[in-house]
Amino acid sequence: MPPILRWTLALAVLGIAAGWLLTRPQGFEAAALDGVSADVAHGEQVFLAAGCASCHVAPEAEAEDGAPRVLSGGQRFASPFGTFLAPNISPHPVHGVGGWSDAELVTAIMHGVSPDGAHYYPAFPYAAYGRAEPEDILSLIAYLRTLPESDVPSQPHEVGFPFNIRRGLGLWKRLFVPEGWVVDAARTPEAARGRYLAEALAHCGECHTPRNVLGGLDTDRWLAGGPNPAGEGRIPNITPGGLDWSESDIVAYLTTGFTPEYDTAGGEMVAVIENLSQLPEADRQAIAAYLKAVSPVE
């Protein structure tokens, strides 16, 4: 074999090996949960803050007062990369996640990796949930296990080549899943709590921050709004450079859905407010304090 071919083959093998290593899924060690306790009542609060029902309740399902939500999935989320369908995350042992261990669920929620080692698409906001405390996620899982089962099978995503090659998401994660917080200027304990809620559990940045051509968040324009991925309208700028509401205005909006101008929330924010309004008022005040601490983007 000519030397040039040997070098080409060697470089190709090295490139494949490097790509395989760079894109490998990162798991979660079950031993890391040793000594971590779960609380079902607290898990319900985490469930509300994280907005799980907003995506995973079937689109045609109607809420009944006081009735637990059935997380059978099926909602569709259009994007420039394809259409993603929310899966069944009810406790059903076959069609839901009832057969998964706690460690497998923590790995899925915080690292975006399935029990069989496949990367999840970032339509599932694991990039935000990865900032959460394991105790909160374990409590969330304990609460999920109390909800009704659904035998509705999860539907496949409608994603074409090359985005249907999930292994490539390992590289996407290395590029765009952040380490640490986006906003450092949480000057008070209240704003720090708001940062935890907004950047981790409620994943506000996933909708309110513009994305680059590869779908990564442009954190230099954190919460500055941008085009709706579904192609309809724009998601608003909620930094102090785009939102001149007072903290009390923000709290009132997150509680009632009414703006200071007596307009009402629309679109996905209706479900967000339905969830956040059930949290303690101190949490909504914390989110408001955090939003006022974010760097303004005009």
Image: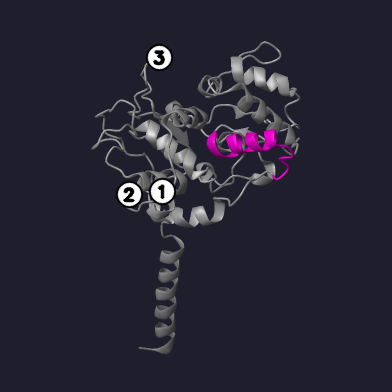
Residue with the mark numbered 2 = 115
Residue with the mark numbered 3 = 66
Residue found at the very far bottom of the displayed protein = 2
Instruction: Name the image quarter holding residue 73.
Output: top left
Instruction: Name the image quarter holding residue 226.
Output: top right
Instruction: Name the image quarter holding residue 6.
Output: bottom left
Q: Amino acid at mark 2?
A: Pro
- Mark nearer the N terminus (1 vs 2): 1
Mark 3 residue element:
loop
> Disc 3 and disc 1: Cα gap in Å?
31 Å
Query: Is there a contact, CB below 8 Å, between mark 3 and mark 1?
Result: no
> Disc 1 and disc 2: Cα gap in Å?
8 Å
Question: Which segment did they paint magenta?
Answer: 184-202
User: Callout 2: 10 Å neighbours few (<14), some, many (20+)?
Assistant: some
- Report x, y in % for residue 161: 39, 49
Name the foreground residue: 11 vs 274. Answer: 274
Q: Is residue 261 above or below residue 227?
A: above
Residue with the mark numbered 1 = 107
Residue 124 visible to an observer of this rendering? no
